[in-house]
Amino acid sequence: MEFSRRRKKFIGGPQTELYGQTLQFYGQPPLENVSLIEFETFAVERLKLLKAVENLGVRHLKTSEDYEKKLQQELRSSIGLSDYDKQRKDHISHFILRLAYCQTEDLRRWFIQQEVDLFRFRFNLLLPKQKLEFLHRNNLKYDTVRIIEGISPSQVPFQDALDLVRTRKVYLRGGYVYIPHQDIVTIILNDFRTRLSKALALAARSLPAVHSDERLQPLLNHLSHAYVGQDYSIQKNVGKISLEQIDSLSAKSFPLCMRQLHQALRENHHLRHGGRMQYGLFLKGIGLTLEQALQFWRLEFIRGKVDADKFDKAYAYSIRHMFGKEGKRTDYTPYSCMKVILTNLPGQGDHHGCPFRHSDPELLKQKLQVYKVSPSGISQILELVKGMHYQLACQKYFELTHNVEDSNFSLNHPNQYFVESQKVLGGGKDMKREVGTPQRSKEKSATAKDVTANASQDTEGIPEDLDSYFLDA
């Protein structure tokens, strides 16, 4: 894959034939030129799609009508494109995220699961003739036998269908299983999962080459924990909450990560740097002014072992820095869920991070009990945590603590949690004080330019032959 400022039309060759296919195993990397704009746009759009796949897969049965209907809606973004362009976009975006998500075991596991679910849905949309063509094109040729009147099952070695054997959905005899054609998708998914797992491991071996390029590395690292939702960096409601409200708001409208930080601050009268950054930017996002922030942190710290003079010398600068009043004058953005989950992991004595990701399950259970979450609700949350669906676990916590069955939004940001909480508590309307609602100019979802702005500032000269990262090293 090559990158350039201008898109160069790729004509002919194996890619033309590849993009004529409705579905593929992604065995061949892109070989054409791709503009930087396309690189960013394709990657962000696929990331949004995979996050939607994850959310729907947990909230609905994957074979249900609701699941299929809502996932079909998510795929409508490609409407208006030719079939060729749709397949080209699908192909390139898969390989970009493959590079971004091969970096750790957690990222690989998440990527594989969402890609498998997306593949299953697309395969089931194929017509019978198209399914057979796909099998033959990928050398997945199984013997068809007639053993039951009116049914022609496929015969495969039992080790290729362990899931079906385990659930006793197939007939087993002589080391072979006989699979009805409607269940053949299980075999294909196992094959797809195996191929993708090996491909990610291979891509991971090439990471040193990727990381050696200081322009490509930030872009891919950013994609692996990119926030693709609403922008909470602009404070429409600056100064519309008082410091006296924070204790009450923390109990009813803060996500668990911020509630945990607030409680630790009140108990210890101090937070380490990671906690101050995570919590301080969140408070900034819900509307605290710089003056309020300085007062809030000063009052709390001097209740501990820090006097006012020491606070002004050692801590006030960093608070002003958050608001873009010191240093490079960068107006820092509140942390998204992915940033909280994946960066700056908490250590001993820290209170930042995501409680669903970084807490011991037993300690998390105890905390939820203290916060009056029902036993059945705790079980649901812990089950989501076990499946590494940390944002969905937080969303379930939202539903349980706000007494709603379906929150009707996909949680991606602590400040989003706060805004949605205030809407629920306000009877479905915008909160009375309009806390945390961004300016109209920022209400749109992040575009590729928004999401990758920081990472793409230095993308001049991205190396050609990126396809080599996907091939044998």
Image (cartoon, rainbow, N blue to C red):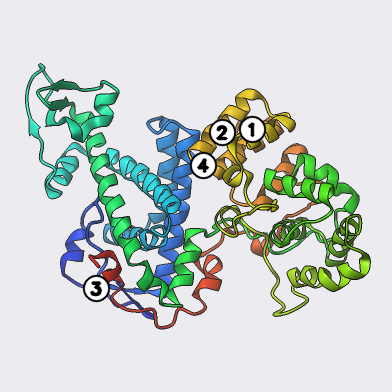
Task: Say which label, 4 or 3, has the lower sequence index.
Answer: 3
Task: Give residue 150's quadrant in the image.
Answer: top left
User: Which marked residue is nearer to the observer: mark 4 or mark 3?
Assistant: 4
Callout 1: 10 Å neighbours few (<14), some, many (20+)? some
Q: Can you say which quadrant of the picture contains the C terminus?
A: bottom left
What is the C-alpha distance between the residues marked 3 and 2?
49 Å
Q: What residue would you read off at disc 2?
A: 382
Whole-percent x, y for residue 468 in the image: 26, 70
Which residue is nearer to you in this view: 285 or 360? 360
Q: What secondary structure is marked by label 2? A: helix
Callout 2: 10 Å neighbours few (<14), some, many (20+)? many
Mark 4: amino acid: His
The residue drawn where x is 32% and y is 56% is: 200
Mark 1: amino acid: Lys
Which residue is nearer to you in this view: 168 or 440? 168
Q: What secondary structure is marked by label 3? A: loop
Whole-percent x, y for residue 460 in the image: 43, 82
For the residues bearing labels 1 and 2, Cβ distance under 8 angstroms: yes
For the residues bearing labels 3 and 1, Cβ distance under 8 angstroms: no
User: Which marked residue is nearer to the observer: mark 3 or mark 1?
Assistant: 1
Q: What residue would you read off at disc 4?
A: 389
Callout 4: 10 Å neighbours few (<14), some, many (20+)? many
Q: What residue would you read off at disc 1?
A: 365
What is the C-alpha distance between the residues marked 4 and 1?
16 Å
Q: What secondary structure is marked by label 1? A: helix
Whole-percent x, y for residue 366 in the image: 68, 32
What is the C-alpha distance between the residues marked 1 and 2?
8 Å
* Horizontal side of residue 302 vs 259, given as left or right: right
Mark 2: amino acid: Leu
